[in-house]
Amino acid sequence: AQAARILTISAANGEMSADDKAYLAQLVASRTGLPQAEAQKRVDEVLARAEDAKNKAKAAADKARKASATAALVGALSLVIGAFIAAVAAALGGRQRDEDEAGYLRSDSRTVTT
């Protein structure tokens, strides 16, 4: 429990003090029967793996951040393009409607002559 607490606090702080490393090595040596040097090596390996995992997690988070920013930019650009196309289509449709209406009015005035 104490080793887990030390590892958790060290992970939160981003580094482990030399005293904590020595204590963990002593704890590993006493519980496993390994020589102090071998226990220190194991503690260093665990800390190196933890640091590597932390760096990989940061890299993955950065990659996800960049991907989401790119997706948001593409989405916003798509919305702008869609709005432009809708405005042009509305203008063309309105013009065509006005021309058709004018054509109907002209054709009605020719046939209504009495």
Image (cartoon, rainbow, N blue to C red):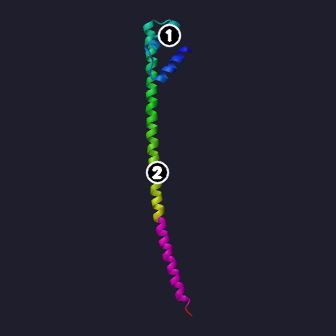
Q: Secondary structure at mark 2?
A: helix
Q: Position of residue 27 (x, y in %)?
A: 51, 9
The crowding category of the residue bearing disc 2, from other C-alpha atoms within 10 Å (few below 14, some 14 to 19, many at least 20), is few
Tell me which secondary structure the magenta stretch mostly adopts: helix
Point 45% across, 21% down: residue: 49
Residue 101 in the image: x percent, y percent? Answer: 52, 77
| Viewer-side label of 2, 1 | 2
Q: Residue furthest bottom?
A: 114
Quarter of the C terminus within the rendering: bottom right
Q: Quadrant of the N terminus?
A: top right
Work out whether mark 2 precedes mark 1 in sequence or the reverse, and give the earlier one: 1
Q: For residue 95: magenta?
A: yes
Q: Position of residue 13 (x, y in %)?
A: 47, 23
Tally of numbered tags: 2
Q: CA distance from mark 2 to mark 1?
A: 55 Å
Q: Amino acid at mark 1?
A: Val
Disc number for residue 10: none
63 w.r.t. 36: above or below: below
Q: Magenta part of the protein: which range?
A: 89-112
Looking at the picture, tell me which residue is in the foreground, 95 or 107: 95
**Res 44 quadrant in image:** top left
Q: Which mark is residue 76?
A: 2
Q: Residues within 10 Å of mark 1 (few under 14, many from 20)?
A: many
Can you identify the residue that label 1 sits on? 28
Residue at x-position 52% and y-position 84%:
107
The image shows residue 96 at horizontal and vertical percentages of 48, 73
